Amino acid sequence: MATKSRSAGRSQRRARRGDDDASPPSTTGSSVPDVVTQPRNHTGMLGYDEIPQELAEAIRTIVNRYELRHDQKLPSTIAVTSALHGEGVTTTSQALSTLIAQETGQYVCWVNCSWLASDQQTDHDSGRPGLIEILADRAKILSAFQSAPDLPQLMSLNPGPVPESKRNMIVRSPEFDQLLDVLTSEFDHVVFDIPPVLNNANGLALVRRSDASLFVVRHRTTSIRQFRRALDATQPTPNLGVVLNKFKTSIPRRLRSMLGD
């Protein structure tokens, strides 16, 4: 990633292949041997030194290819998601957020959207306002942010939990639109950690309202057919690329490097 300064005027808050014989969709992809859950600092975010080297390089490759291919900078809002559970979305989305903040100096907000899922598990700090409180009074969002002490331009927002009966209404409400406007006006980039889109219509709705998506696919777990369905469902949102997690191959590393992998 090339270093670039934050935009002026913004505030400082501011596959398992299975039996499918079809070819995978044409997307920019990078493979990593294993996206694992790393130790987190007290803000719950993945620290820069905690990002696995293979994952960092995979993300840099996807970002650089996107910027070269489209001759434009990284989109403002990025939805990181998957087709199925357990693909490594949270680690990948936090790594993306941390890398952008650290290596470009821009202001980034990572948003935990696990409240969209019926089987949600959130790291919400009960001492901070939740999503319903923030929507009722957007000024409360200032006390909902958490910043990393060693990377002040990176913030996280954990706004859950939300009762299941309210999720569908909230994600399509004018108040939620206004919250998204606040985030995009205060930060150079907003990265959403979104539940799998094949079984979560509310998560899918948020992906479609983002500027771009980034998929995480677990090798030999997600089939090409499942990935195609997930990618098609997120259209017309552009796709940055795919992180292929837990990638295993019998081809020696030296030979793979000669082949350009």
Image (cartoon, rainbow, N blue to C red):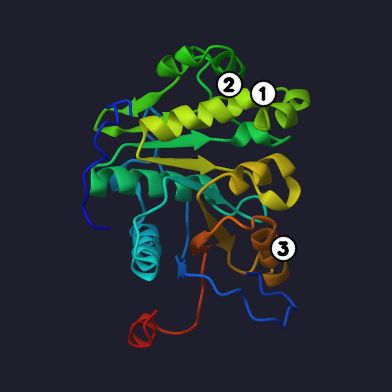
Q: Are marks 2 and 1 in contact (CB under 8 Å)?
A: yes
- Measured from the top left, where is residue 238 in percent x and y? 54, 59
Say whether disc 3 or disc 2 marks the residue closer to the N-terminus: 2
Which quarter of the figure is the C terminus placed in? bottom left
Which quarter of the figure is the N terminus placed in? bottom left
For the point 42% across and 31% down, which residue is it?
156
Vertical side of 230 occupied by 219: above or below? below
Say whether disc 1 or disc 3 marks the residue closer to the N-terminus: 1
Say whether disc 2 or disc 1 marks the residue closer to the N-terminus: 2
For label 1, the SS is loop
Q: Residues within 10 Å of mark 2 (few under 14, many from 20)?
A: many
Residue in the foreground of this view, choosing between 120 and 168: 168
Disc 1 residue type? Val
Q: Is residue 163 left or right of residue 97?
A: right
Disc 3 residue type? Arg
Name the residue that disc number 3 marks: 229
Mark 3 to mark 2: distance in Å? Answer: 30 Å
Vertical side of 136 occupied by 25: above or below? below
Q: Is residue 197 left or right of residue 190?
A: right
- Measured from the top left, where is residue 194 in percent x and y? 59, 43
The reply to whether residue 123 is in sight is no
Name the residue that disc number 2 marks: 131
The reply to whether residue 38 is in sight is yes
- Measured from the top left, where is residue 117 in percent x and y? 69, 37
* Number of marks in picture: 3
For label 3, the SS is helix
For the point 61% across and 54% down, which residue is it?
82
Disc 2 residue type? Leu
Mark 1 to mark 3: distance in Å? Answer: 27 Å
Mark 2 to mark 1: distance in Å? Answer: 7 Å
Name the residue that disc number 1 marks: 162
